Image (tube, helix red, strand yellow):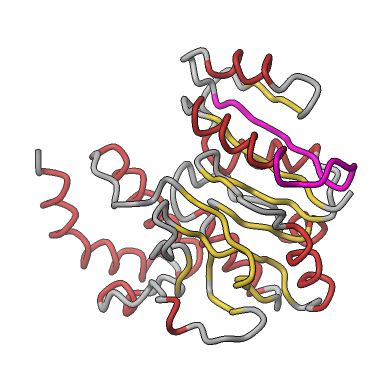
Amino acid sequence: MNFSFIIINYRSLDFTRSCLNSLFEFLPTDKSWEIILIDNNSADGSAAKLSAEFKNRLTFIQNASNRGFATANNQGAKIAQGRYLFFLNSDTEIKTNILPPLLSLFAAQTSVGIIAPLVLAPNLKWQFGACGRRQTLSSLLFQTTKINWHEAGLADYWTTDWVSGAALIIRHDLFNKIGAWDENFFLYLEDTDLCFRIKKANYKVAICPTVSLIHYGGQSPATSNERRRHYYLSQSYFFRKHYGRARASLMALIRWPYKTLILLKK
């Protein structure tokens, strides 16, 4: 088996249903791929509806609590049979068979550990922020973490520091080797961390420009204070993990005025 799609549902019945239907519509009807769907205790009835609607067409995992993005994805990876793990957000859709170019790129470029398709907004334009440069103090200060597609060039594949976990494909054996998703991240930056570790293992993170999908999320920054708090917690942990406590403290000090202003806004 080549690909294992790992998808998390959390109170997103319509999006998840559309995502699954697009896979069944455009991918070949063979044994070269599988779908593992994890429900993070949606508690809105969507889990039961999806389980019944797609019965016997996928593997379903029901969690008793919301275990977060990283933990739920690791659950799926542990039972996946594919050579490549395709972590896919439930609010995405494909419009063609995207697997052959991905398979060819992995076969041709053995130094590539992670591949992402082009992530498009619903208007079919490049979704800014779906890939970027590694977070450092300077890149955050000067806001140079995001990459515009005009910078990528016209090569068979583009390299980058990180790609969004909304659509991320990784070699299964390499995923196991580097230690899977870091479950200390509940939400945000777990994809940046995974790509960081892939690059430290001397593999490339790439984008395949001949393959695309639509991502209905990620259209604007998070507006709720709760989501912002998750982001800041993840950012602080990321800096401590990869740069040490001193730089993490400096980053938090630099960030403090902006963070305070944002979180106090109503």
Percent position of residue 216, x then y: 43, 46
Q: Which residues are magenta?
A: 25-40
Quadrant hosting residue 103:
bottom right
Residue depicted at x 52% and y 12%: 45
Q: Nearer the viewer, residue 21 or 186?
A: 21
Q: Residue at x 48, y 41 (%)?
A: 186
As drawn, 99 above or below 154: above
Q: Is residue 28 magenta?
A: yes
Residue placed most toward the observer, 238 or 78:
78
The vertical placement of 45 against 139, above or below, is above
Q: Is residue 73 left or right of residue 217?
A: right
Could you tell me residue 154's position as x and y percent?
Answer: 57, 86
Task: Name the residue: 30% across, 44% down.
Answer: 229
Question: Residue 79 in magenta?
Answer: no
Q: Residue at x 71, y 46 (%)?
A: 26
187 shown above or below 206? above
Where residue 133 appears, as percent x and y from the top left, is 45, 75
| Image quadrant assignment for residue 64 | top right
User: Could you tell whether 167 is left or right of 137 in the image?
Assistant: right
Number of dots carrying numbers: 0
Q: Position of residue 159 (x, y in %)?
A: 59, 79
Position of the C terminus, as image quadrant, is top left
